[in-house]
């Protein structure tokens, strides 16, 4: 009878915390920053067998769709499935001097999971998330600027209440009030007229 492997519990007390939350997503991020020179000069690229290098590259790509972003599961069955190979084949590949998991190590995630992370993949994921946040903030600012421009033109030219705009921060306060009070209402002229009366009455109290 073949000897059974005894699985011992993994000590997790000293594992580093992964810096990316499991709630952060890159669902709309279709490009991964890739430093070609860094990759070509890396120890993994230069020393790994071609098959191992290809599987390692696929795991890097897979990590960007995982939760948290930039990590891999520790379950070898899931790793093999991600590569489209059997667990037995995965075991064979991992017997090589350099494996597809070269540079990956266990980390503790904020959702309690223990997963695998790679310092370079983590670095790229952190920057991608920061870039995504900047893009969202810039897009929101552009939307706000357009709302304010349209609101100013409607109040000044169509409603003829330009005197209201002389008040300090009136337009910003009115826009914020509309967004909070009537977030789903289209800002047509009739609605804005009524909203102006309501807003100015509230401000006068």
Image: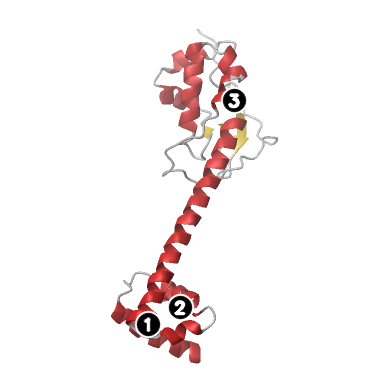
Lower sequence index among marks 2 and 3: 3
Lower sequence index among marks 1 and 2: 2
Give the Cα separation between the discs numbered 1 and 3: 57 Å
Specify the farthest residue to the top: 1
Q: Which residue is mark 1?
A: 195
Residue shown at the point (69%, 36%) measured from the top left = 13
Q: Count how many numbered circles sit on residues in the image.
A: 3
- Secondary structure beneath label 1: helix
Picture layout, residue 183 above or below residue 104 = below
Q: In this image, 103 relative to 153: left or right?
A: right
Indicate the position of residue 204 as horizontal and vertical percent values. Answer: 49, 91
Specify the farthest residue to the bottom: 205
Q: Which residue is mark 3?
A: 38
Picture layout, residue 96 above or below residue 62 = above
Number of other residues with Cα within 10 Å of mark 2, as a class: few under 14, some 14 to 19, many 20 or more? some
Residue shown at the point (56%, 32%) measured from the top left = 121
41, 22: nearer the viewer: 41
Residue shown at the point (38%, 71%) measured from the top left = 150
Number of other residues with Cα within 10 Å of mark 3, as a class: few under 14, some 14 to 19, many 20 or more? few
Indicate the position of residue 4 as horizontal and vertical percent values. Answer: 54, 14
In which quarter of the view is residue 19 placed?
top right
Q: In this image, 49 relative to 17: left or right?
A: left
Picture layout, residue 172 above or below residue 136 = below
Q: Which residue is mark 2?
A: 174
- Secondary structure beneath label 3: helix
Q: Could you tell me if the residues under marks 1 and 2 are in contact, i.e. CB atoms within 8 Å? A: yes
Give the Cα separation between the discs numbered 1 and 2: 9 Å
């Amino acid at each position: 009878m073949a000897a059974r492997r005894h699985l011992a519990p993994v000590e997790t007390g000293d594992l580093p915390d992964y810096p990316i939350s499991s709630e952060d997503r890159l669902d709309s991020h279709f490009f991964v920053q890739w430093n070609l020179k860094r990759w070509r000069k890396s120890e993994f690229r230069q020393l790994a067998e071609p098959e191992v290098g290809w599987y390692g590259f696929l795991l890097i790509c897979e990590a960007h769709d995982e939760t948290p972003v930039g990590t891999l599961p520790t379950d070898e069955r899931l790793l093999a499935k991600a590569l489209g190979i059997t667990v037995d084949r995965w075991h064979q590949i991992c017997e090589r001097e350099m494996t597809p998991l070269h540079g990956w190590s266990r980390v503790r995630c904020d959702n309690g999971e223990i997963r695998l992370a790679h310092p370079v993949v983590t670095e790229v994921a952190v920057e991608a998330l920061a870039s995504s946040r900047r893009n969202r903030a810039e897009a929101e600012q552009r939307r706000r600027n357009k709302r304010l421009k349209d609101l100013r033109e409607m109040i000044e030219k169509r409603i003829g209440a330009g005197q209201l705009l002389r008040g300090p921060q009136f337009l910003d306060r009115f826009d914020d009030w509309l967004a909070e009070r009537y977030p789903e209402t289209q800002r047509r002229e009739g609605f804005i007229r009524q909203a102006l009366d309501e807003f100015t009455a509230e401000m006068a109290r």
